Amino acid sequence: MRINRLAGVVLGAALLMVTAVPTASADTETASSTAGSLDRAALRTTLDAVHEAGMYGSYSSVREGTERWTGASGLADVDTRRPVKPGMRHRVGSISKTFTAVAVLQQVERGRIRLDAPVGEYLPDLVKGERGRDVTVRMLLNHTSGIGDYFLGAFPSFADDSTAGLDEERFRSIRPEELVRLGLAAPATGRPGEQPGSYSNTNYVIAGLLLEKVTGQNAGTYITRNVMDRAGLHATSYPRTPYIKGPHSRMYESFYGLIDPPRDYSVYDMSWASTAGAIVSTTDDLNRFYRALLTGKLIGPAALGEMLSTVPVTAGEGSIDYGLGIYVLDLPGCGRFWGHDGAVFGAGTIALSSRDGKRQLAMGWNLMKYQRLNEDGTALEPSPIDGAINGHIAQALCPAPESREAVAGARHLLPEGLPGVDLSPGQWVPRG
């Protein structure tokens, strides 16, 4: 399999099957001690199963009504054997897109941005000519702009089947305008407004620059003050340096065995992800954020209605129903959930919430692209980690045992392409 086939997944990530290490687990229970619908023992068991299947470490926060559970299992550092703990900070990748979309929609509510206005009306020197006239703000947010992704331009070694760029660019600072230039220079994925759309990180870097143009503020500063602070998030931030402040795990990247042993990328200049994927958060904060969003605390009902209006979008080799910075996922027998996934080098995350915000899961892990290539290098071998992650998500979101069994055993629990790219039978590759 050529790396450049996988590079189209962009912020994509999956995890390497590794030798299991002794389980270190922890959990906190911050709800009433009376019996309820959350089976804390089962949540601990299914999270431990992810580690036992080969994951270095993972953490999870689950909410059902007023009940909450937060747990962690495995190792934050494979050399020192330091365990992961609940509440560790974590790079959440493309979940950042939901934050950016909320910020843009706040400006829509204030009349400073029109969703169906051409982008060139706001950024004439950035998105020029026919594209500036034809691509609208809405098309950026729902990935129907037809603008290609900047990833291969920013990390050209991937086009040559080499992971060297991961290390060569570790401390590089790249301006968002340069990311947009690279994306605009990439082959178009379709005509503006054409459906299905095509997932592209360039769209959300442009959205961040649009936000800066209309507010006169740095996008990270605006989102911090008007989205993160408003949602009551205490451990969520845009990084100002390559380092993560506060307790966090190391973040290991394997790239399907091409990096062996997996290398730690917890120190990384995230300017390459910009407003498309640079946020650091915790699983508790992600649940708090999506609950605030879906219950109308961040934007009003009209803007939220626009956000939850979906179109088909291709991502990798699959598709998903994508709104404005958020997608919808139907789990058979369990219900409909809104949220996003995200991945950067060494870190993967998924956050899903019911529409009323009462049933939620946010989960992160610290070893990426764990699957192995098959003998001819054309596909990925299934990994037991996939099924274990499915099992934990099913335990968290599915109230009925029979529904949990169906979802945990599904070929595709997560969407094909975003986050599940169907590269080989019976497995999914998370992406962001």
Image (tube, helix red, strand yellow):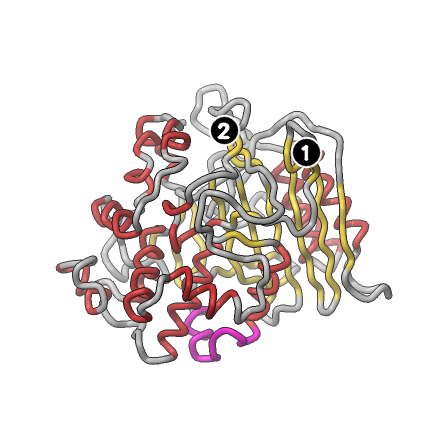
Q: Which mark is residue 256?
A: 2
Q: Which quadrant, please, contains the N terminus?
A: top left
Closest to the observer, 359 or 240: 240
Q: Residue at 31% across / 72% down in the picture? A: 115
Say above or below: 72 vs 307: above
- Is residue 200 left or right of 245 when viewed as pictured? left
Q: Magenta stretch: residue 273 in it? A: no
Q: Position of residue 8 (x, y in %)?
A: 36, 40
Give the extent of the magenta segment: 295-307
* Mark 1 Cα-neighbour bin, 10 Å: few <14, some 14–19, many ≥20: many
Q: Magenta stretch: residue 306 in it? A: yes
**Which residue, as the protein is rendered here, is positioned at the far right?**
34
Q: Amino acid at mark 2?
A: Tyr
Q: Is residue 350 visible?
A: yes
Q: Amino acid at mark 1?
A: Ala
**Which residue, as the protein is rendered here, is positioned at the far left?**
129
* Mark 2 Cα-neighbour bin, 10 Å: few <14, some 14–19, many ≥20: many
Total numbered labels: 2
Instruction: First in sequence, mark 1 or 2: give its number.
Output: 1
Q: Which mark is residue 53?
A: 1
- Is residue 334 left or right of 127 when viewed as pictured? right
Element type at mark 1: loop
Q: Position of residue 200 (x, y in %)?
A: 34, 51
Q: Residue at 20% across / 69% down in the picture? A: 121
Q: Position of residue 413 (x, y in %)?
A: 58, 48
The answer for how far apart the CA atoms under marks 1 and 2 are is 16 Å
Q: Residue at 85% across / 63% down in the picture? A: 33
